[in-house]
Image (cartoon, grey):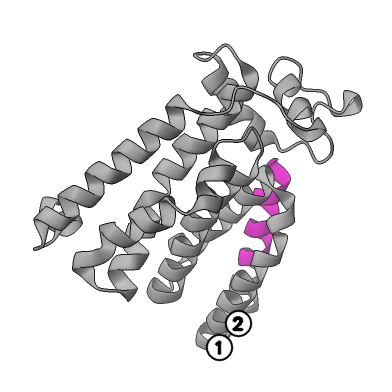
């Protein structure tokens, strides 16, 4: 496991890993405690009273994002900061699929360095520090892209279900990411060419719908 994640160029990997840790430590410490827009106010108020009729938050409710914020809110009193820290934690977890994709499609010894560069991009740092759902959604998007790649390679039912589950999670955090469903359409097309099974295709579509209906 150590060799898989650190590779042969361990000094560069250790340096990148430490830099990544320090980056997220700073993001947690300086996570925004302020709700600077009406949407951010709605999200923050929803942690104490989740009510779409009162616009806390507005439709469609972003239930998974609010649930994550509520979990962090149990330890962080300020609701806006709780949402910001939840974003940071989610993006921290997204380092795993970033690393795995970088390791697969780039130089293996540079995978951690690429991950650090992506995580330290100004846009990523900015959205992770705000009490908005974009940070958490971007994190799940990375997991979704990785899962789609796994489904494309392995072509198993379980791999397909994982990508469908993560897409349901993604839309339950940020509905505007629905265009990324195009990746599922390509997966299903490839699956249809291989199996030519209406039952299997219907099962995939039904599973995708079920994961959306949960939230």
Q: Is residue 170 above or below residue 198?
A: above
Quick check: is 125 in the magenta stretch? no
In the rendered image, residue 180, in percent from the top left (x then y), is placed at 64, 65
In the rendered image, residue 176, in percent from the top left (x then y), is placed at 74, 55
Q: Check disc 1 and report its element: helix, strand or loop.
A: helix
Give the magenta-colored segment's residue range.
204-215
Q: Name the residue under label 2.
A: 189
Which quadrant of the figure has residue 38?
top right
The answer to which of 29 and 132 lies nearer the viewer is: 29
At a point 44% along the width and 25% down the height, the residue shown is 29
In the rendered image, residue 78, in percent from the top left (x then y), is placed at 60, 15
**Going by the image, does 214 lie left or right of 148?**
right
Which quadrant of the figure has residue 5?
bottom left
At a point 44% along the width and 60% down the height, the residue shown is 158
**Going by the image, does 21 lie left or right of 183?**
left
- Of circles 1 and 2, the one toward us is 2
Quadrant of the rendering where the C terminus is positioned: top right
Name the outermost residue toward the top: 77
Q: Looking at the image, can residue 136 be seen?
A: no
Q: Looking at the image, can residue 33 be seen?
A: yes
At label 2, counting other C-alpha atoms closer than 10 Å, the crowd grade (few under 14, some 14-19, many 20 or more) is few
Name the outermost residue toward the bottom: 193
Mark 1 touches mark 2? (CB < 8 Å): yes
At a point 62% along the width and 28% down the height, the residue shown is 67
> Principal SS element in the magenta part?
helix
Q: Check disc 2 and report its element: helix, strand or loop.
A: helix
In the rendered image, residue 185, in percent from the top left (x then y), is placed at 64, 75
**Going by the image, does 3 lie left or right of 47?**
left
The answer to which of 215 and 9 lies nearer the viewer is: 9
On residue 193, the disc is: 1
Quick check: is 213 in the magenta stretch? yes
């Amino acid at each position: 496991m150590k060799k898989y994640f650190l590779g042969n160029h361990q000094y560069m990997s250790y340096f990148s890993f430490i830099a990544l840790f320090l980056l997220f430590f700073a993001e947690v410490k300086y996570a925004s405690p302020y709700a600077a827009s009406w949407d951010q106010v709605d999200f923050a108020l929803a942690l104490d009273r989740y009510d779409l009729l009162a616009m806390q938050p507005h439709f469609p409710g972003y239930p998974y994002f609010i649930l994550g914020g509520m979990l962090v809110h149990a330890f962080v009193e300020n609701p806006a900061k709780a949402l910001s820290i939840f974003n940071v934690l989610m993006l921290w977890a997204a380092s795993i699929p970033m690393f795995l994709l970088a390791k697969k499609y780039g130089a293996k010894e540079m995978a951690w360095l690429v991950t650090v560069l992506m995580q330290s991009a100004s846009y990523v740092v900015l959205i992770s520090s705000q009490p908005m759902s974009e940070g958490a959604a971007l994190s799940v998007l990375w997991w979704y892209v990785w899962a789609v790649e796994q489904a494309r390679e392995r072509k198993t039912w379980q791999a397909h279900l994982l990508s469908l589950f993560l897409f349901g999670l993604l839309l339950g955090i940020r509905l505007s990411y629905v265009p990324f469903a195009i990746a599922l359409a390509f997966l299903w097309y490839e699956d249809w060419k291989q199996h030519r099974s209406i039952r299997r295709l219907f099962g995939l579509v039904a599973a995708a719908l079920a994961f959306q209906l949960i939230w």
